[in-house]
Image (tube, rainbow, N blue to C red):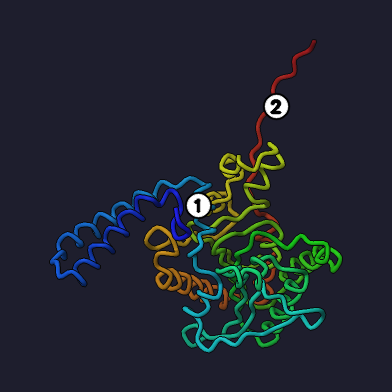
Amino acid sequence: MNGAYLDFEKPIADLENKIQEMKDLSLNGGFQLEGEILLLEKKLEKVQKEVYSRLTRWQRVLLARHPRRPQSSDYISLMAADFLEIHGDRGFADDKAVITGFGSIDSKPVAILGQQKGKDTKQKLKHNFGMAHPEGYRKALRFMQLAAKFSLPILIFIDTPGAYPGIGAEERGQAEAIAHNLREMSFLPVPVVIFVIGEGASGGALGIGIGDRVYMLENSWYSVISPEGCAAILWRDAAKAPQAAEALKPAAFDLLELGIIDGVIPEPGGSAHREPAQQAQRIKETFLTALDELESTTTDKLIRNRIQKFRVMGQFYEVEPLPRQDS
């Protein structure tokens, strides 16, 4: 398939191409094909529901990486008015993998932070494929502390294949920067609402992932390691990523069941890239609803609840040991 469609989206691609051909014939060739086009559009809607309703975990991972999937900058432009970007960590550099700035959502001032991958080759290189260096996490923390100073709620978009693992990043304290964020975010005195909009890989995601509410889009994933990384470690074969995805359970519905996240946001049309504006509206509504609840909570209780939320995270199963057999 071409870059606009994944392999399992082939039935959708075939129908969309056919509809476009008929529209071109109707417009340029003078043919009256409105009835046929309407029938195909109805069929397309049915096929979309069928394709996206039976996705495997691995296919959801692929959708989270879809080349047309909306990124943080898309949601910011769709949701926030008068967005003003803030740059730099005031220590080393301005990491383009992290976007920070102030804007308003429905006339409400908000601090917005997001990881940005980039879409074409030039953008991907500029944003380092969404993999932040230590200065990216320090930039994020500086910004969040600035938001706290002015009592602004914080909206965070997570979308990263992981923190950058290069030598320079390690020399500048990658692990320390992430760990420092975990501690400091736990005590932020303002509401923090987080959305995993694409990939949420390991400490790269968790470094900006401590909040009062954590939501995932339906086809995003969030895990300690990517399926390819897991497969390479367990079976020494990255091609077994689909098998690893089933074992990792990184999908939104898995993490909701395990108590890791607070909710799953459905994706209109089966995937966020099909209806970005509708997806942004759903995120905005979820954010404002969560904010109404959180802003009525005292600061002490807000912090206490946030810390407790992560302390008890996860579910554990105990089984009776097998009876011992004496030799």
Left or right: 257 as drawn, with respect to 16: right
Q: Residue at x 79, y 68 (%)?
A: 177
Seen from the viewer's position, the closer of residues 21 and 286 is 21
Kindly indicate the quadrant of the structure image that contains residue 221: bottom right
Residue 305 visible in the snapshot: no
Measure how far apart labels 2 and 1 are at the Cα level.
Answer: 36 Å
Above or below, 232 relative to 142: above
Give the image location of residue 265, x and y in percent: 46, 62
Give the image location of residue 293, x and y in percent: 53, 73
Seen from the viewer's position, the closer of residues 313 and 231 is 231
Disc 2, disc 1: CB below 8 Å? no
The image's mark for residue 223 is none
Left or right: 105 as drawn, with respect to 25: right
Q: Residue furthest front?
A: 29
Q: Residue at x 58, y 39 (%)?
A: 243
Element assignment for label 2: loop
Q: Residue furthest top?
A: 327
Q: Which residue is mark 2?
A: 321
Give the image location of residue 234, x and y in percent: 70, 38
Q: Residues within 10 Å of mark 2 (few under 14, many from 20)?
A: few
Element assignment for label 1: helix
Q: Residue at x 58, y 66 (%)?
A: 213
Sequence-wise, the earlier of marks 2 and 1 is 1
Give the image location of residue 176, x and y in percent: 82, 65
Amino acid type at mark 2: Pro
Q: Residues within 10 Å of mark 1 (few under 14, many from 20)?
A: many
Above or below, 314 relative to 175: above
Seen from the viewer's position, the closer of residues 62 and 52 is 62
Q: Which residue is mark 1?
A: 60
Kindly indicate the quadrant of the structure image that contains residue 212: bottom right
